[in-house]
């Protein structure tokens, strides 16, 4: 089944297809009028003929090919009936070809849509490059938090697996070989909140980062690395966040050994709260209508605990340079654009979202 993909050769392919269609239509038209002339030649001299000119012949041929069959015109000579037999065969062929073409076209459109070739228009979404068990866990957390996700995979079988696991309104999938960065236009990558590089090894991830940065230098990129020694290399290449999976796992494991309750709590708060009773770490942006605007951090700390049962643990100042202050002391004021970081459960999150007039999470 043909699948139309986005590439630079599509213009040339389209011209070739149009040329082929023109040739087929031209040859068919010539053959059609030759058959009509032969029909008229056989019929016009017969005294009982009702096909005597080109108009009669065209009318009869159209009625025959479309299987309407009014019966007002028909060939009466042996030669004319032979031409009629040819048109009968043609009418069957036309319908079979037409039905086949329509069926093939519909199947192609559905297949291309499933593969993501028609693109999507989400903004502020997360783009995941590459798919696997780790990518699925990340997607689960993002979907649970109500975030839109676009997954780009080079493994065709992954498309069905992803579509079975998630709603198409939550997760968009694109099949691509990843060598042509321009295909990322299909996932509206320029308007993505962040791009997560989830390829097989560090070398492949680094090469992809260097390539995509040429096209989209201002995007935020996050990558998990197998070799923690390469963290500075990835940051120098333009990655916003480089995270070592082994480093995180070793820290959590060590914490379980000497402070298991703290480790268990840490593991809970870094994942999305699945129920109203579950706690996790959240961040909310301060907008102009925020009730805590221009108040001191210490006062907001007590007010949030009293009013919402949320524990304020930090604040991010200066959205552009992103300066994180962890539970700061002194006279720190809350300004527009700041992010308040807090520990809260699902029920509290809804209350804070209404109070702050915004959903949790980082926004551009």
Image: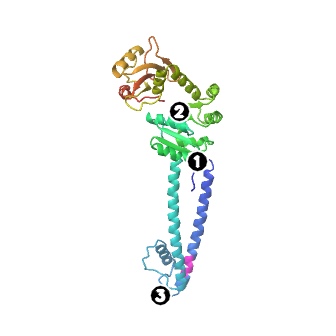
First reached walking from the N terminus: tag 2 or tag 1: 1
Q: Which residue is pictured at 42% across the width and 23% down the height?
A: 343
Residue 276 within the segment the image draws in magenta: no
- The label shown at residue 231 is none
Farthest residue to the front: give it: 257
First reached walking from the N terminus: tag 2 or tag 3: 3
* Residue of label 1: 6
Q: Is residue 109 visible?
A: yes
Measured along the vertical axis of the image, is residue 77 above or below residue 296?
Answer: below
- The label shown at residue 48 is 3
Crowding near the residue tagged with mark 3, few <14, some 14–19, many ≥20 C-alpha atoms within 10 Å: few
First reached walking from the N terminus: tag 1 or tag 3: 1
Question: Along the line of sight, which residue is nearer the eye, 54 or 291?
Answer: 291
Task: Where is residue 193? Give x, y as percent.
Answer: 51, 33
Task: Where is residue 168? Give x, y as percent.
Answer: 46, 44
Contact between labelled residues 1 and 2, with CB atoms less than 8 Å apart: no
Q: Is residue 146 visible?
A: no
Question: Which is closer to the viewer, label 2 or label 3?
Answer: 2
Question: Which is closer to the viewer, label 2 or label 1?
Answer: 2
Assign the magenta stretch its main secondary structure. helix
CA gap, disc 1 to disc 3?
60 Å
Contact between labelled residues 3 and 1, with CB atoms less than 8 Å apart: no
CA gap, disc 2 to disc 1?
23 Å
Magenta extent: 35-40
Image-based side of 101 in relation to 359, left or right:
right
Q: How is the image coloured?
A: rainbow
* Residue of label 2: 194
Task: Where is residue 12? Give x, y as percent.
Answer: 63, 53
CA gap, disc 2 to disc 3?
80 Å
Q: Which residue is pictured at 52% across the width and 84% down the height?
A: 43
């Amino acid at each position: 089944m043909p699948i139309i993909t986005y590439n630079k050769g599509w213009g040339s392919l389209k011209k070739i297809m149009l040329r082929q269609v023109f040739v087929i239509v031209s040859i068919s038209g010539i053959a059609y009028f030759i058959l009509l002339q032969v029909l008229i030649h056989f019929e016009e001299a017969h005294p009982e003929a009702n096909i005597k000119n080109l108009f009669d012949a065209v009318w009869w041929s159209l009625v025959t090919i479309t299987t309407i069959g009014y019966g007002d015109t028909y060939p009466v000579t042996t030669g004319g009936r032979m031409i009629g037999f040819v048109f009968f065969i043609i009418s069957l062929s036309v319908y079979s070809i037409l039905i086949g073409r329509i069926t093939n076209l519909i199947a192609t459109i559905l297949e291309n849509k499933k593969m993501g070739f028609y693109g999507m228009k989400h903004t502020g979404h997360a783009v995941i490059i590459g798919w696997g068990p780790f990518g699925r866990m990340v997607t689960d957390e993002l979907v649970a938090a109500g975030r839109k996700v676009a997954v780009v995979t080079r493994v065709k079988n992954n498309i069905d697996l992803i579509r079975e696991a998630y709603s198409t309104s939550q997760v968009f999938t694109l099949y691509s070989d990843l060598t042509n960065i321009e295909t990322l236009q299909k996932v509206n990558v320029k308007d993505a909140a962040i791009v997560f590089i989830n390829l097989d090894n560090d070398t492949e991830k680094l090469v992809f980062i260097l390539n995509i940065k040429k096209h989209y230098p201002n995007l935020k990129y996050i990558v998990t690395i197998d070799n923690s020694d390469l963290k500075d290399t990835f940051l120098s290449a333009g990655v916003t966040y480089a995270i070592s999976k082994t480093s995180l796992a070793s820290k959590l494991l060590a914490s379980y050994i000497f402070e298991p309750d703290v480790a268990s709590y840490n593991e809970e708060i870094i994942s999305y709260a699945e129920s109203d009773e579950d706690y996790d770490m959240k961040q909310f942006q301060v907008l102009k209508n925020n009730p805590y605007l221009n108040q001191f951090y210490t006062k907001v700390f007590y007010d949030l605990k009293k009013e919402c049962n949320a524990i304020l643990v930090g604040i991010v100042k200066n959205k552009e340079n992103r300066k994180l202050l962890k539970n700061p002391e002194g006279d720190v004021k809350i300004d527009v654009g700041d992010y308040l970081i807090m520990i809260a459960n699902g029920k509290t999150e809804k209350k804070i979202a209404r109070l702050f007039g915004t959903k949790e999470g980082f926004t551009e």
